[in-house]
Image: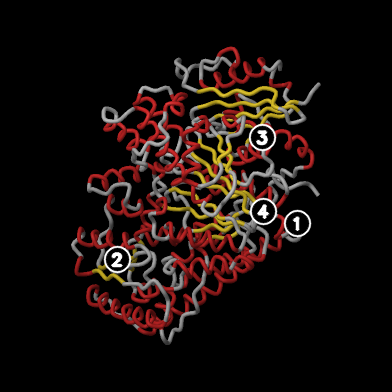
């Protein structure tokens, strides 16, 4: 019996399927619009192909009809089935058995290369998102960029335009005036489609359609075109929107590149899945599917100590004055002064663990006028009751919005005259250190007058010494992790966030870091020679994680088998403090933590690559680039420098605190990224091969 390979792509608006022979010929294909079934949720009959009363049943029924049309009796006669698409979920396997699931990005690359093996650039525009893929010659792997949460650069935009104009979507290209000079908003799909209304009775239909198609092309490029910036050559244009020749025409006009629309452009994801089904069958017996490369979640005493101390800090009571601080004001000063402190951003992050409380906080902040444009950490602080402070300290960098919110909070709590903003320069030269040292000393004077506490120079010197001891153990921990195979999960270690700890300058942090080092040594000894550094992927995690959900990091490490071997928030980059010159030392520490100076941060990340041995970086882009610690300028600079070092960067747009604005493409991006790393490291997208 002939081997047959089935590729299925279930997207947001269409179902695609391709049946491929062992010789790579397309035996049968299907492109069909999808819609919800009318019956709603029903009790499952267990016979999906005959019932079709729910969406999963309808999916199975469609697949069985497709196979029947191709002369195949059932799914059991298929050699291998691979699925892809945004609508493939965990339960899909119960209704539609498949052998493997791949990302849409990887599937579209495989589909394009099946008929265009030498292609170097691909643009896929579907109903829900746009994807650009370009082969990076230096890295010898495919880089990609996906559009965000807006539908403006997707098929959904043209669908809405067609409805408003009363024109079938299939006729738009034929009825467009390609010389139209009309301009439409390209900010978002809703505004773009709405702006068409004002032209409907003033201009010929053909000009409106032409302007809309050009707006579509421009918006596609504004979302993912960054990847084509320095590219010259053919671009394979695929996806449902490629049916519209007018969009292809304007894409060529905007990019200056030749646009090629392949024969099976509408089903390229399914075609690629079928190609990968063929490859998976050939490799199946040789693939190593062991999870031994991923460390388990260890029960570490250092974690318990850290949690206990955090709970005491944030929930404990005491007679000492309470000081509000942001993440970057040096804790050594406050601990030496004997004050209690509340780090506001950390306090907000703790709220993210409780869905009900975080929702109420956002609601309250919205009533005060703080929209989603305001950082979610800061919206939490504006939406909850905070313990009243005796004093507040903040830094102007790296978050100016945070500093302004803190000013509003001290005004709300009537402590305007008891607030100090440390105006932090964006660099660490000699003048900046001298200025900052004087300002830190001045802040101590203000704290003393407002709280009645007195700074004992001996206690400040002791705090600096304790900070140095904790720093030394932290460096030992980091060095051991850098030189070893994965010892602990990144998903576990990232919540240490050592550089943001309130315990710098206290004996507790020395004990915690000492204990962590001892535990790492034991884990390294137990691992022995079973695993080598080069046996696994080694990912560096930049910025913060989503605090409300750790499943993303677990997905990367467990499901994708790509260990996170270090986290930026645990990097210790400052020089030892000088107890005899505390203010200058602390000024230097403030300016060299890595987040103050973006150029220093980029340089540190790139220069440490050979030491940490990482082959990939993931940046969690809090606030979609609005956060000053992950803004577009920083991302551009980092990508350029990492590209020189041949290290691929994955940017995950999301939010550390607000789960409601996470894009639906996050897991697709992760899967595609790891599949590309697999292809580069192991020669296939599926993972390592057996020895």
Q: Residues within 10 Å of mark 4 (few under 14, many from 20)?
A: few
> Distance from label 2 to label 1 (Cα)?
50 Å
Relative depth, front residue between 532 and 28: 28
> Distance from label 3 to label 2 (Cα)?
55 Å
What residue sits right under mark 2 in the picture?
Answer: 322
Residue 263 placement, left or right of 3? left
Q: Are marks 2 and 4 in contact (CB under 8 Å)?
A: no
What residue sits right under mark 1 in the picture?
Answer: 530
Q: Secondary structure at mark 3?
A: strand
Q: Residues within 10 Å of mark 2 (few under 14, many from 20)?
A: many
For marks 4 and 3 on the same chain, the one whose residue lies earlier in the sequence = 3
> Does the image show residue 653?
yes
For marks 3 and 1 on the same chain, the one whose residue lies earlier in the sequence = 3
What residue sits right under mark 4 in the picture?
Answer: 140
Q: Secondary structure at mark 1?
A: loop
Point 59% across, 44% down: residue: 234
Q: Secondary structure at mark 2?
A: strand
> Distance from label 4 to label 3 (Cα)?
25 Å
Tag of residue 452: none
What residue sits right under mark 3 in the picture?
Answer: 100
Q: Residue furthest front?
A: 179
């Amino acid at each position: 019996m002939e081997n047959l390979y089935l590729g299925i792509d279930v997207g947001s608006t269409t179902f695609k399927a391709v049946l491929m022979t062992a010789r790579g010929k397309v035996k049968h294909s299907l492109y069909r619009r999808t819609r919800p079934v009318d019956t709603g949720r029903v009790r499952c009959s267990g016979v999906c192909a005959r019932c079709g009363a729910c969406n999963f049943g309808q999916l199975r029924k469609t697949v069985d009809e497709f196979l029947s049309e191709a002369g195949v009796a059932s799914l059991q006669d298929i050699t291998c089935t691979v699925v892809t698409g945004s609508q493939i979920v965990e339960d899909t396997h119960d209704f539609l058995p498949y052998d493997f699931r791949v990302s849409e990005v990887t599937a579209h690359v495989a589909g394009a290369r099946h008929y265009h093996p030498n292609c170097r650039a691909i643009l896929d525009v579907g109903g829900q998102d746009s994807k650009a893929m370009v082969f990076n010659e230096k890295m010898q792997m495919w880089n990609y960029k996906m559009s965000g949460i807006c539908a403006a650069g997707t098929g959904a935009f043209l669908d809405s335009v067609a409805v408003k104009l009363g024109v079938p979507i299939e006729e738009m290209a034929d009825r467009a005036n390609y010389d139209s000079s009309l301009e439409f908003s390209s900010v978002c799909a809703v505004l773009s489609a709405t702006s068409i209304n004002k032209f409907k009775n003033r201009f010929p239909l053909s000009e409106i359609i032409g302007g809309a198609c050009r707006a579509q092309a421009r918006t596609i490029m504004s979302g993912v075109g960054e990847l084509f910036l320095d590219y010259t050559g053919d671009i394979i244009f695929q996806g449902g929107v490629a049916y519209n020749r007018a969009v292809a025409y304007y894409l060529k006009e905007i990019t200056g590149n030749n646009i090629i629309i392949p024969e099976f452009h509408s089903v390229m994801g399914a075609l690629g899945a079928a190609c990968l089904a063929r490859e998976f069958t050939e490799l199946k017996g040789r693939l190593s599917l062991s999870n031994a490369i991923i460390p388990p979640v260890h029960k570490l005493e250092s974690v318990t100590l850290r949690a206990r101390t955090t709970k005491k800090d944030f929930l404990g009571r005491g007679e000492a004055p309470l000081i509000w601080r942001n993440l970057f004001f040096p804790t050594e000063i406050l601990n030496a002064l004997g004050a209690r402190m509340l780090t506001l951003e950390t306090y907000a992050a703790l709220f993210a663990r409780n869905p009900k409380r975080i929702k109420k906080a956002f609601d309250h902040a919205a009533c005060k006028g703080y929209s989603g444009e305001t950082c979610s950490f800061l919206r939490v602080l504006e939406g909850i009751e905070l313990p009243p402070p005796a004093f507040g300290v903040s830094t102007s960098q790296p978050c100016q919005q945070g500093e302004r919110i803190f000013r509003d909070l001290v005004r709300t709590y009537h402590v305007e005259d008891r607030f100090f903003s440390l105006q932090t320069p964006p660099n660490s030269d000699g003048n900046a250190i001298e200025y900052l040292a004087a300002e830190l000393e001045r802040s101590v004077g203000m704290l003393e007058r407002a709280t009645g506490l007195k700074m004992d120079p001996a206690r400040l010197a002791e705090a600096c010494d304790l900070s140095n001891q904790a720093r030394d153990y932290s460096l030992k921990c980091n060095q051991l992790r850098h030189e070893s195979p994965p010892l602990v999960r990144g998903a576990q270690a990232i919540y240490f966030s050592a550089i943001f700890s309130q315990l710098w300058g206290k004996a507790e942090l020395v004990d915690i870091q000492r204990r962590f080092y001892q535990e790492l040594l034991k884990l390294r000894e137990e691992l022995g020679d079973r695993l080598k550094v080069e046996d696994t992927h080694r990912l560096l995690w930049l910025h913060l994680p989503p605090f409300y959900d750790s499943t993303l990091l677990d997905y990367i490490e467990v499901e994708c088998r790509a260990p996170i071997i270090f986290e930026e928030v645990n990097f210790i980059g400052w020089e030892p403090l000088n107890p005899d010159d505390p203010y200058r030392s602390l000024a230097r520490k403030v300016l060299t933590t890595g987040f103050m100076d973006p150029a220093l941060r980029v340089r540190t990340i790139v220069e440490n690559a050979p030491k940490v041995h990482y082959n990939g970086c993931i940046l969690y882009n809090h606030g979609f680039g609005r956060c000053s610690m992950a803004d577009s300028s920083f991302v551009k600079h980092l990508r350029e420098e990492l590209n020189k070092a041949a290290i691929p960067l994955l940017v995950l747009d999301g939010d550390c605190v607000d789960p409601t604005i996470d894009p639906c493409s996050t897991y697709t991006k992760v899967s595609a990224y790891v599949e590309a790393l697999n292809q580069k490291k192991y020669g296939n997208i599926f993972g390592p091969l057996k020895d």
